[in-house]
Image (tube, helix red, strand yellow):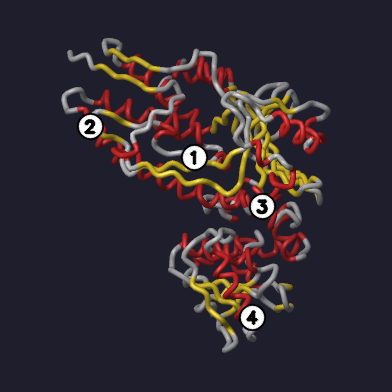
């Protein structure tokens, strides 16, 4: 039997897990991990483990799954803590585990081959910093704080009985006002202690007297990595080397470890075909799922980067907007999983009583667009339009990035049209769910200032995301050509 030689460059989560799987399944192979740092040296704090990931680990390695489960701190709910009130998201089943413990249970590399793999890196507009605290959190918490310098947003969760991890985001403008912007390039291995002190004061109510601690915690934009190819000859990229996942979707660990399972499965399925062919099969099967997830990640990242635009809403509305931000969850999904949130969101958006919402029952999708709306310039008897007047200006939308530099030209065109007498700004584009979500993002950007009217493609399958968008505050008005 042929004994293959497998070398892993970097002892990250994906590399270590793939190495362990290969060594367990093929004890006669030579599997070697090359890592420049000591085994106990790692940066960061805790990482999230979803139920889906634990299921995948159970199938891939039952013994390792049991060890991970024992070391995972679980929590079942999340919530938004806003100045105007709190909201809990029920049945939010997930957990977290110390990154150090995870690496120990399995066992960072800067190696890249951009020319062969066609690597592309794009930077987010918001800066984030990961830190920890000796503080107990009973639920996963999303909360903004308005400091003297503007808004900072925290995503915090427990990873033990007394430990919690904080991911804190702030715009470049906010960092400029705090005077912390110049410290984003702290030396290698250093934490930004000045920022940690500032943020400890800002989030003191959540910390309960504790302070934030760092582990190479520094401000920086998220780097989105995409590669045209994941393999070249006998070399294959795993984990963040192939595709990075923004922390707002809390699936980075899941993708890294499931991406380790896939090549291990491919390499051990048969030892007769050439390695390059095996890696070709692995990439063909795995890439579509990761690319779909990265599309969702873009929408999730843009949602967090524009959070200030919706933080003033009644608590149920940004919570609903969060859950539906990438299109993976709809209002219909909340009927069995979180009916209280669904009811509160509908009542908040329409100013309705609970019995009115309940009376609509399964017909909520059609009930929502027929509710009155107080738009930027007038009161409309219904949110649904089946025709547009001569005073309607049209903007064609091709991107969901409604707050980026490229969007400013479209916003200026909309303002000019209204200044010249337009009564509505109709947002149009392709007939697809993704294109509709792009238009809803622009509707949210315009609605506080201009009378935006989002065009909805014909069909009930498009009316559902449109109704979700109305309730979540992404648009006030929709145009549905076949509304009759």
Question: Which residue is located at x 61 percent, y 48 percent?
Answer: 336
Query: Residue 418's mark?
Result: 4
Q: Residues within 10 Å of mark 3 (few under 14, many from 20)?
A: some
- On the image, the x and y values in percent for residue 183 come to 65, 36
Please state which of the two labelled residues, at mark 3 or mark 2, is closer to the viewer: 2
Of callouts 3 and 4, the N-terminal one: 3
Of callouts 4 and 2, the N-terminal one: 2
Question: Which residue is located at x 23 percent, y 32 percent?
Answer: 233
Which secondary structure lies at badge 1? Answer: loop
Q: CA distance from mark 4 to mark 1?
A: 39 Å
Please state which of the two labelled residues, at mark 4 or mark 1, is closer to the viewer: 4
Query: Residue 60's mark?
Result: none
Of callouts 3 and 1, the N-terminal one: 1
In this figure, which residue is indicated by the disc labeled 2? 233
**In the image, 388: left or right of 196?**
left
The residue nearer to you, when weighing 393 against 17, is 393
Q: Residues within 10 Å of mark 2 (few under 14, many from 20)?
A: few
In this figure, which residue is indicated by the disc labeled 3? 307
**In the image, 242: left or right of 359?**
left
Which residue in the rendered view is the most extreme toward the bottom?
A: 390
Q: CA distance from mark 1 to mark 2?
A: 25 Å
The residue nearer to you, when weighing 188 against 78, is 188
Q: CA distance from mark 3 to mark 1?
A: 19 Å
Can residue 17 be seen from the camera position used here?
Answer: no
Question: Which residue is located at x 56 percent, y 26 percent?
Answer: 188
Q: CA distance from mark 4 to mark 2?
A: 57 Å
Q: Quadrant of residue 373?
A: bottom right
Of callouts 1 and 2, the N-terminal one: 2
């Amino acid at each position: 039997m042929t004994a293959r030689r497998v070398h892993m460059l970097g002892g990250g989560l994906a590399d270590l897990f793939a190495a362990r799987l290969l060594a367990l399944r093929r004890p006669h192979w030579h599997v070697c991990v090359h890592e420049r740092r000591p085994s106990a040296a790692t940066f960061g704090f805790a990482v999230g483990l979803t139920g889906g990931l634990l299921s995948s680990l159970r199938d891939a390695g039952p013994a390792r799954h049991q060890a991970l489960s024992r070391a995972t701190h679980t929590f079942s709910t999340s919530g938004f803590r806003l100045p105007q009130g709190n909201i809990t998201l029920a049945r939010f089943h997930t957990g977290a585990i110390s990154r150090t413990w995870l690496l120990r249970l399995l066992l960072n590399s800067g190696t890249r081959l951009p020319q062969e793999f066609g690597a592309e890196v794009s930077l987010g507009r918001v800066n984030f910093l990961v830190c920890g605290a000796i503080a107990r959190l009973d639920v996963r918490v999303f909360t903004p704080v308005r400091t003297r310098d503007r808004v900072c947003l925290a995503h915090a969760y427990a990873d033990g009985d007394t430990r919690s991890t904080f991911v804190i985001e702030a715009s470049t403008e906010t960092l400029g006002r705090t005077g912390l912007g110049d410290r984003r390039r702290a030396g290698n291995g250093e934490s930004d202690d000045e920022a940690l002190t500032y943020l400890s004061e800002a989030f003191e109510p959540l910390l309960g007297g504790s302070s934030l601690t760092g582990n190479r915690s520094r401000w920086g934009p998220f780097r989105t990595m995409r590669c045209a190819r994941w393999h070249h000859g006998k070399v294959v990229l795993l984990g963040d080397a192939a595709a990075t996942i923004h922390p707002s979707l809390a699936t980075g660990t899941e993708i890294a470890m499931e991406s380790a399972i896939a090549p291990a499965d491919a390499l051990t399925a048969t030892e007769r075909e050439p390695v390059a062919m095996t890696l070709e099969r692995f990439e063909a099967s795995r890439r579509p799922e990761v690319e779909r997830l990265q599309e969702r990640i873009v929408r999730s990242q843009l949602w967090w980067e524009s959070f200030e635009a919706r933080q003033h809403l009644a608590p149920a509305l940004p919570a609903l907007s969060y859950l539906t931000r990438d299109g993976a969850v709809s209002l219909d999904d909340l009927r069995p999983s979180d009916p209280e949130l669904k009811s509160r969101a509908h009542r908040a958006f329409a100013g309705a009583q609970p019995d009115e919402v309940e009376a609509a029952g399964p017909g909520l999708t059609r009930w929502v667009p027929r509710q009155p709306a107080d738009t930027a310039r007038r009161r409309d008897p219904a949110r649904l339009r089946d025709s547009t007047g001569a005073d309607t200006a049209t903007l064609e939308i091709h991107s969901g990035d409604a707050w980026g530099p490229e969007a400013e030209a479209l916003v200026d065109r909309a303002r000019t049209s209204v200044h010249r007498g337009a009564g509505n700004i109709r947002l149009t584009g392709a007939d697809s769910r993704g294109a509709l979500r792009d238009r809803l993002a622009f509707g949210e950007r315009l609605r506080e200032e201009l009378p935006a009217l989002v065009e909805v493609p014909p069909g009930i399958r498009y009316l559902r995301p449109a109704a979700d968008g109305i309730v979540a505050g992404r648009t006030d008005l929709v145009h549905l050509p076949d509304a009759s």
